[in-house]
Image (cartoon, rainbow, N blue to C red):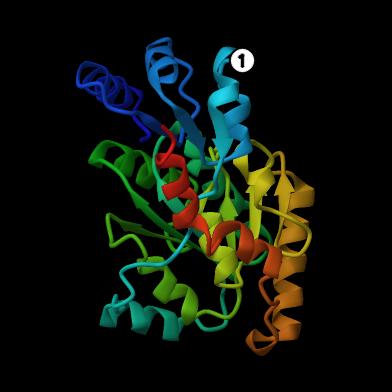
Amino acid sequence: TNDGILNFHFSIICFFFRKKHILHLRNTDDSKRNYFSFYFSKKIICISNFIKKNIPIYFKKKAIVLYNYVDFFNKNIKLQKKHIKFLNQNKKKFFLFFISNIHKRKNPNLFIDIIYRLNKIDNNYIGLMFFQSDIVEFRKLKHLIKTKKIENNIYIFRNYPVHYWVKFAEKINKKVLIAPSENEPLGRNIIEAIFKNIYVFAYNSGGHKEIINKSNGLMFNSCSKNLIKLIIKKFSEIKKKSHENKAKVKEKFIQKFQNKNYIKTIEKIYSIQ
């Protein structure tokens, strides 16, 4: 789980009932309480090499990397009529997606700054923010957007169904994903976007490096003038190619994140005596 405390409690239960413990690690929590879970686990399944590198050296022998099988659920989601109308009214605009939950590491302020700087050049860029958050974080973002006077350039979709953004993406031709998270364990939203043939601009850190390559995206270190130029250039390329000429998702990428042997591999790990 993402919660070190949950791992700790589950490890205690396994210890007292003498049950085999396989630890699925999806974060880089380096708290000492995790040492108990690491010590008593038979195997530590890491969702990325970035996660594995952050495990204390004493436990690395137990660790293996197994990328999550990424698939889309909630396939029956339909766009609300007001959102269909919104998209029809903005067909000529350029759309940038932000998909995440909200806390400091996710860097939503960086996304807002990108939208602000793009619209200083040309008022044709729209940011779509899909996220889960509490009301406090939501109000902070609303305040920042208002301060920058880009209320008409950023639209927030808070606590909607997980894959509601996919239905938006399917109806938009000119789109990119901005993934500004720092030290993200992997980045499922990036993988999903690439499966949907969406070009990705990702922060140069963490598990992003295991997803992004020259064919599907670009890494950046800050909201620089060069980044803004590259985003504008990418939209220009998308406009010329049109939606009919989408880049095909590479076979290696599919094998990496939709491995047909994923379940068999999990079963093999759990069969360890």
Residue closest to the eye, 41 or 159? 41
**Above/below status of 203 relative to 197:** above
Would you say residue 150 is visible in this rendering? Answer: no
Task: Tell me the quarter of the picture where residue 167 sits.
Answer: bottom left
**Above/below status of 223 relative to 50:** below
Position of residue 113 measured from the top left corner of the image (x, y, whole percent)? 57, 46
Q: Is residue 103 left or right of residue 11?
A: right
Residue closest to the eye, 105 or 1? 1
List the single residue furthest toward the front.
273
Position of residue 63 measured from the top left corner of the image (x, y, whole percent)? 55, 29
Q: Secondary structure at mark 1?
A: helix
Task: Tell me the quarter of the picture where residue 176 sits.
Answer: bottom right
- Seen at 56% across and 61% down, the residue is 259
Residue closest to the eye, 242 or 51? 51
List the single residue furthest toward the top.
32
Q: Is residue 233 left or right of residue 270?
A: right
Number of marks in the rendered image: 1
Position of residue 169 measured from the top left corner of the image (x, y, whole percent)? 48, 74
**Above/below status of 19 relative to 102:** above
- Seen at 44% across and 19% down, the residue is 38
Amino acid type of the residue that numbered disc 1 sits on in the rendered structure:
Ile
- Seen at 40% across and 41% down, the residue is 270
Image quarter hosting the C terminus: top left
Image quarter hosting the N terminus: top left
Question: Is disc 1 surrounded by few (<14), some (14 to 19) or many (20+) residues within 10 Å?
Answer: few
User: What residue sits right under mark 1 in the picture?
Assistant: 57
Residue closest to the eye, 31 or 44? 44
Would you say residue 72 is visible in this rendering? Answer: yes
Position of residue 267 measured from the top left corner of the image (x, y, whole percent)? 42, 49
